[in-house]
Image (cartoon, rainbow, N blue to C red):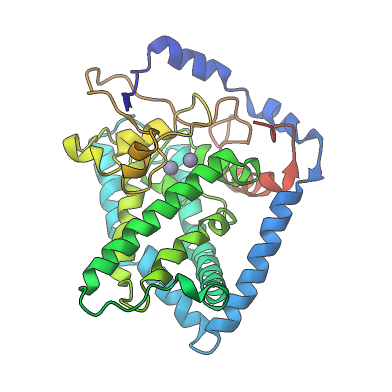
Amino acid sequence: METAPAPTAESQAQTAESRRPAAESQSLWASRRLYLPTIVIAGLAAWLSYHGWTALAQTGVARSFDAGRYNLAGPVVLGFVLTVCVLEQVFPAQRRPLLARGHLLDFCYAVFYALLVIPLVVLLGAGFSGLLARLAPWLVLPRASGVPGWCFVGLAVLGIDAVDWLTHLANHRLTALWRLHAVHHSQEELSILTTYRAHPLVHVSFLLSAVPVLAVADNTATPAVVLTAYACLGALPHANVRWTYGKLGRIFISPAYHRIHHSATGRLDINLGTVFAIWDVLSRRALFPAPDKDKNTVIETGLSGRPIPVEQAGPRPRLGRTMLTQLAEPFISTRTETR
Ligand SMILES: [Zn+2]
Ligand SMILES: [Zn+2]
């Protein structure tokens, strides 16, 4: 384990200089061939969604969408996000207006998430879980009558976090997945809303987190409140605050810790955890924030060189156009595909 080096003014200036203007980055679109891996992932998503729709048709697809929205974007999550938005204004890591371009586009992503991405996640989850139950019934742990249900809930949460960590690592190591994950990393004005800045197809890669839930299914049903709490704890590390959580930051992912993962210095395979830091520590990929000595230094975030268009480039934010371009970008073959 190491501690993060404090970024110097010089290194920040270099990072800023290395960001090319949007016009130049858009020249990467010169070759407009389709990128086959993204097409395949989209096809897989359509196939799983069809099976999910069929599976949910008996109980009611709309009701499942409502339940998904309630758990992942209901009053609890909404209240949590709004509270953190206020705290970001009071204790900002990087002071910026509430209506900064990054906040506005991430808000658009949050609305997109609530309206369309959650239904997609519900369909994908139902399709994938049905497939798992049919093809790999051995994944379900046998019934253990003497063990309290909460032990299995804890096991499921740890399992989800471990699988999310592995998937996140794959998102950074495999270019086909990175093309989708890069949308999340393109944010130069990190905030709690950046949680929702994600390409919808990236959720295909995170489907394996259904395995731990299925594994404990014969012993306990993972309560929705636990999944909501996990969603909130997973969102908090994006907050634009300096919190390190002190000693608890060695166990839980803090905003200062996750900010290092979003560092503009490169495609970093460190600090990959969602809620718990243990997987990073065990794999020696944990880079803990240094004790905060200088309140004026802050790690720049985003993608150096702006390989995909961002709202901060250009005289006007063009939110709709930027978002559509970011969502379309992984479908286009470019010379940025090599690592
Ligand atoms: Zn990442
Ligand atoms: Zn993130």
Residue that sits furthest to the left in the current view: 247
Q: Residue at x 24, y 35 (%)?
A: 243
Residue 147 point in image, percent of width and height: 21, 73
191 above or below 314?
below
Q: Is residue 230 left or right of residue 165?
A: left
Q: How many marks?
A: 0
Quadrant occupied by the C terminus: top right
Query: Which residue does the image show at 55% across and 68% down from the upper left?
Result: 124
Decide which of 109, 180 is in the foreground and name it: 180
Q: Residue at x 35, y 39 (%)?
A: 282
Percent coordinates x, y for residue 169 in the rendering: 50, 43
Q: Residue at x 32, y 49 (%)?
A: 275
Residue 323: give x, y in percent of width and height: 59, 47
Answer with left or right where residue 24 lies relative to residue 55: right
Up-down: is 15 above or below 60?
above
163 up-or-down from 245: above or below: below
Residues 117 and 207: in front is: 207
User: Which of the 4 quarters of the picture holds residue 214?
Assistant: bottom left
Query: Looking at this view, is 131 or 31 the one in front?
Result: 131
Residue 322: image quadrant is top right
